[in-house]
């Protein structure tokens, strides 16, 4: 059996190897090894270098960009397609953004799909007559369950005064319907990069089209659609009365390193959807990459890696602390009960708000752990007699009863302030805020109370520490890891999409941890006091056998 210290060292070692391996992989993606060959001018005179694949864009051809729409996923000619955008003198170095109106076919209005065909071809030649054209296909529609309508529970007034009957019917069925992607983001890799044919990156290879020109192999312009820019907030529901919808087509050049990185990220998001993540869940991941600077994104990766490590260590030490916990001396039982209640309420709130699984799953796991802590804190045991079960509560000793008295005294003072604030906030939101249902209002009222005033329920533990003039009974190892994660959460609060109240709650915990640290400095460790396991250091020495 591994000791605790060796197990922790093993975990930290595995973590370090994982970070080093990830950095090496990312370096291989961003920095592609070029073909060892002379420059383009020398290559043309020398007849080329064997195994090298040269860029066709180095010849500076005159190009044209054409965007078509059709209801078919494959087209062989110009039949049944509509031209929506044509850029005749297309400059690959110049970015642009244009908004066009797209006619929506009847098939698409009846929950069908509409595709966009983007062609990059020689100017003055139709795409299907150009042997050196490149094209890519992207669906302009996706399927999602419409967001439920919110109403004022007192007056019945909805957020929109006029709601179409068919939209009401669709929402009632709670089935996925066709939504319009209002943005189409295009990129062309503009670097005159010479690839090594013997070590061609697989991620870029599937976007490449090669042609033989003389003795050399050239790759045509690499056309790429940035699917990460397709956000849920840009989606528009398609109903049967819709005949035209706006489409914003934007273009920007892209480097090879960013192109390869973006391809890997899109594949990762697609894999999440294959594993059952919804469009909204995948959208949260997209937001991390699209709405964040690349340098800040690299910092976020390292921060997230350390967050994962500290989460594991905090979880390990917290479980170990409560598993061995024999006495509740110095521990606020009501604070444990409140943490359990607030964690369950936050989980139900995030579930009602259809928050990303990235936030929802950890909240659910935390709720289960807090329920287990309540069982330990109340010394609950379940006794089965046949098919019937009874719950018994253990007795408290004198030290635990004194702690409970301090705890009750602190809660008495807090109740004078807390309950009126929570009730007043719930009544105000009922009159002025619109909700999907009474359940939604109830959960939102609870969670707003948790977020706004929940830190007050951490005060009983501070009060108990003050009365006992000790903090030795607290799980300081778990607290230390959680403190690191609390400050890391402050960074994630600005990156991952989440309700504003949940974001503000991250900063609330910072203040509480600072007060705990102040108390640890104020009350030095007394080895005669009991620790978090109900034991004192001096008692351990008395029981420890002497060695000869």
Image: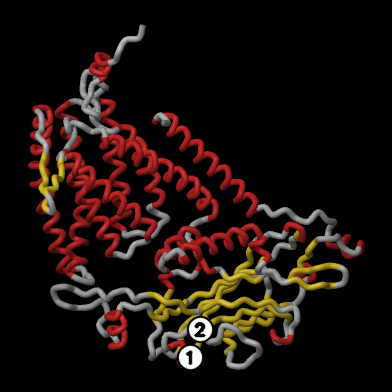
Say the numbered circle drawn on residue 105. Answer: 1
Q: Name the residue that disc number 2 marks.
A: 114
Occupied quadrant, residue 328: top left
Gap in angstroms between the C-alphas marked 1 and 2:
8 Å
Q: Nearer the viewer, residue 295 or 536?
A: 536
Label 1–label 2 contact, CB within 8 A: yes
Q: Residue at x 42, y 85 (%)?
A: 111
Q: Residue furthest top?
A: 548
Judge whether residue 101 can be spotted in this image.
Answer: yes
Label 1: state its secondary structure.
loop
Q: Residue at x 50, y 75 (%)?
A: 183
Q: Residue at x 28, y 34 (%)?
A: 321
Quadrant of the snapshot with the C terminus: top left
Image: 409 above or below 180: above
Label 2: state its secondary structure.
loop
State how the image is colored: secondary structure
Q: Position of residue 376 (x, y in %)?
A: 20, 40
- Work out whether mark 1 precedes mark 2 in sequence or the reverse, and give the earlier one: 1
């Amino acid at each position: 059996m591994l000791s605790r210290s060796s197990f922790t060292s093993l975990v930290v070692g595995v973590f370090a190897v994982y970070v080093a391996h990830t950095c090496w992989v990312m370096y291989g993606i961003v920095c592609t090894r070029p073909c060892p060959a002379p420059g383009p001018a020398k290559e043309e005179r020398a007849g080329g270098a064997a195994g090298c694949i040269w860029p066709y864009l180095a010849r500076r051809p005159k190009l044209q960009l054409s965007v078509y729409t059709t209801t078919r996923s494959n087209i062989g000619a110009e039949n049944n397609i509509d031209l929506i955008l044509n850029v005749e003198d297309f400059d690959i170095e110049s970015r642009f953004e244009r908004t066009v109106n797209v006619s929506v076919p009847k098939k698409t209005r009846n929950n069908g799909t509409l595709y966009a065909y983007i062609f990059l071809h020689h100017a003055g030649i139709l795409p299907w007559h150009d042997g050196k054209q490149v094209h890519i296909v992207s669906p302009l529609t996706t399927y999602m369950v419409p967001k439920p309508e919110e109403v004022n529970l007192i007056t019945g007034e909805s957020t929109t005064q006029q709601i179409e009957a068919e939209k009401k019917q669709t929402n009632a069925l709670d089935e996925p319907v066709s939504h319009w992607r209002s943005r189409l983001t295009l990129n062309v890799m503009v670097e005159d990069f010479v690839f090594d044919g013997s070590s061609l990156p697989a991620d870029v290879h599937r976007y490449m089209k090669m042609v033989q020109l003389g003795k050399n192999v050239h790759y045509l312009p690499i056309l790429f659609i940035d699917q990460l820019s397709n956000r849920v907030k840009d989606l528009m529901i398609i109903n049967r009365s819709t005949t035209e919808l706006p489409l914003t087509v934007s273009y920007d050049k892209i480097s090879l390193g960013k192109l390869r990185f973006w391809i890997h990220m899109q594949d990762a998001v697609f894999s999440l959807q294959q594993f059952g993540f919804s469009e909204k869940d995948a959208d949260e991941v997209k937001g991390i990459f699209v709405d964040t600077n690349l340098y800040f994104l690299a910092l976020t990766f390292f921060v997230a890696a350390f967050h994962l490590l500290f989460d594991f260590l905090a979880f390990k030490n917290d479980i170990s602390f409560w598993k061995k916990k024999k006495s509740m001396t110095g521990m606020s039982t009501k604070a444990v009960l409140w943490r359990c209640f607030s964690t369950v309420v936050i989980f139900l709130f995030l579930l009602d708000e259809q928050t990303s699984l990235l936030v929802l799953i950890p909240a659910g796991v935390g709720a289960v752990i807090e329920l287990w802590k309540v069982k330990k804190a109340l010394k609950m045991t379940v006794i089965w007699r046949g098919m019937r079960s009874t719950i018994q509560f253990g007795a408290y000793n004198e030290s635990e009863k004194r702690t409970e008295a301090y705890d009750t005294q602190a809660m008495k003072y807090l109740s004078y302030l807390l309950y009126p604030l929570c009730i007043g906030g719930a009544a105000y939101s009922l009159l002025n805020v619109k909700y999907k249902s009474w359940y939604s209002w109830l959960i939102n009222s609870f969670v707003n109370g948790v977020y706004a005033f929940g830190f007050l329920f951490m005060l009983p533990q501070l009060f108990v520490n003050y009365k006992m003039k000790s903090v030795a009974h607290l799980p300081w190892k778990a607290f230390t890891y959680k403190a690191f994660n609390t400050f890391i959460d402050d960074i994630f609060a600005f990156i991952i999409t989440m309700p504003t109240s949940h974001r503000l709650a991250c900063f609330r915990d910072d203040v509480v941890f600072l007060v705990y640290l102040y108390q640890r400095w104020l009350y030095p460790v007394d080895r005669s006091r009991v620790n978090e396991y109900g034991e004192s250091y001096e008692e351990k020495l008395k029981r420890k056998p002497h060695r000869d």
